[in-house]
Amino acid sequence: MQIRIGNIVSYCFHPIIVVCFTFWFIIFQSKSVQYNQYIIFLISIIFIAILPIVNVLYLKHKKLISDIDASKKDERLLPLAFGALFFLIGFIILERLNSPLIIQGMMFCSIINTIIVWLITRKWKISIHLITLSWSFAIFLYTGFIELIIMIIATLLVSYARYILKAHTPGQLIAGLLLGLISTYTQLILLF
């Protein structure tokens, strides 16, 4: 039963779902984007979610990764590299469209965090679920749209789920949480 709950929580808080929700919320609910909301959302989702998903499916089809989660540490490097490239292209397009700085910042933080994760993953496995979740929380904190209790509950749920699924050690979970939160918030404060 715990494994089933862990799987449900992991899929509900999958990094792709978290980033899509965060972009949707900031673009449509926070009033941070006043014009071209649908175009900005579409471009964001294409580069932050759709292209990475298609890439992972392609890599799986070519047997370059064994599962769509790229569960094995060494198999994460190629999807992460392509992800950083997609995020970079998305950032350039959003910058050229003169999209609001928060949207550019979200995409930029995705690039930098992915590069950091790629570097770490060469030696050690870190929780991408918690990096992405804390990326989202940092953005919500930065824009003033978060309840601390929601952040704590979501963090505990995802941490517990990833631990009982034996996807990560407590150290990998804590490192992911701190990396995503500190890196994202620092980048937003300093650059955007």
Image: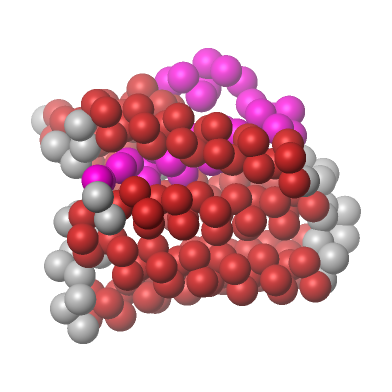
Number of numbered discs on residues: 0
Left or right: 53 in relation to 46: left
In percent of width and height, residue 65 lies at 20, 70
Q: For this rendering, which residue is in front, 124 or 160?
A: 124
Q: In which quarter of the image is residue 186?
A: top right
Q: The magenta stretch spans which residues?
A: 124-153
In percent of width and height, residue 109 lies at 60, 50
Q: Which residue is drawn at 42% across and 32% down?
A: 177
In percent of width and height, residue 27 lies at 73, 51
Q: Residue at x 34, y 48 (%)?
A: 120
Is 21 above or below relative to 41? above
Residue 136 drawn in magenta: yes
Q: Which residue is drawn at 72% across and 57% down?
A: 104
Is 187 above or below relative to 75? above
Q: Quadrant of residue 90?
A: bottom right
In percent of width and height, residue 22 lies at 59, 46
- Display colour scheme: secondary structure
Q: Is residue 175 visible?
A: yes
Q: Can residue 6 be seen in this view?
A: no
Q: For this rendering, which residue is in front, 22 or 127?
A: 127
Q: In which quarter of the image is residue 35?
A: bottom right
State the predominant SS element of the stretch in magenta. helix
Q: Which residue is drawn at 36% across and 32% down?
A: 175
Q: Residue furthest bottom?
A: 62
Is 44 above or below relative to 139? below
